[in-house]
Image (cartoon, rainbow, N blue to C red):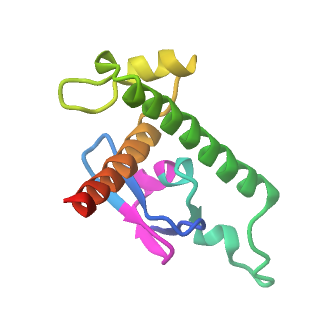
Amino acid sequence: MKKFKTVNGDCCRLALTSGHVYFIDTEWKDLPAMAHSAAYAQGCISEDMVTGDSKVGLTTEVLSNMKEVEMEKRIIRDAIQKAIDTNDLEFFKKDGDPSLMKLNQAIGRSVEKNLVKDVWGTMTSSRDIDLEDEV
């Protein structure tokens, strides 16, 4: 097992196709090998990336990858928000989640399903909080 954590301060949800779900935050957490690629895709770092004699920190390549993931999430969030703002009901599946096919069409290329789930989870949880405050 490797230990992973986020570096941007946010909690990260990893949902694997096997049904396993992991939550990663700023504290090191052991993850089984099957979850490593999903953690890296979400922009998490592993302990072996930052350990060593000098404790140097993150490499430029890792930081670049993390920025790309954050940019991808922003693009996904903007596309979903546009569908909400325009009341595009066809954009969403019967269960209320965004349609991956419609999202890919809106963005003009394929996006990773786990990133869509992470963005949608963040958007819906923040909306629930806003609704409770208004009541």
Expressed as whole percent of the image width and height from the top left, the position of residue 71 reads 64, 42
Which of the 4 image quarters holds residue 51? Answer: bottom right
**Quadrant of the snapshot with the N terminus:** bottom left
Residue occupying image coordinates x 44% and y 73%: 29
Which of the 4 image quarters holds residue 63? Answer: bottom right
Relative depth, front residue between 70 and 21: 70
Residue occupying image coordinates x 61% and y 45%: 69
Indicate whether residue 35 is drawn in magenta: yes
Q: Is residue 58 left or right of residue 31?
A: right
**Quadrant of the snapshot with the C terminus:** bottom left
Q: Is residue 117 left or right of residue 19?
A: right
Decide: is 99 above or below 13: above
Residue occupying image coordinates x 34% and y 46%: 16
Relative depth, front residue between 44 and 96: 96
Relative depth, front residue between 1 and 104: 104
Q: Is residue 103 left or right of residue 18?
A: right
Decide: is 59 above or below 47: above
Look at the image and give the residue range highlighted in magenta: 23-38
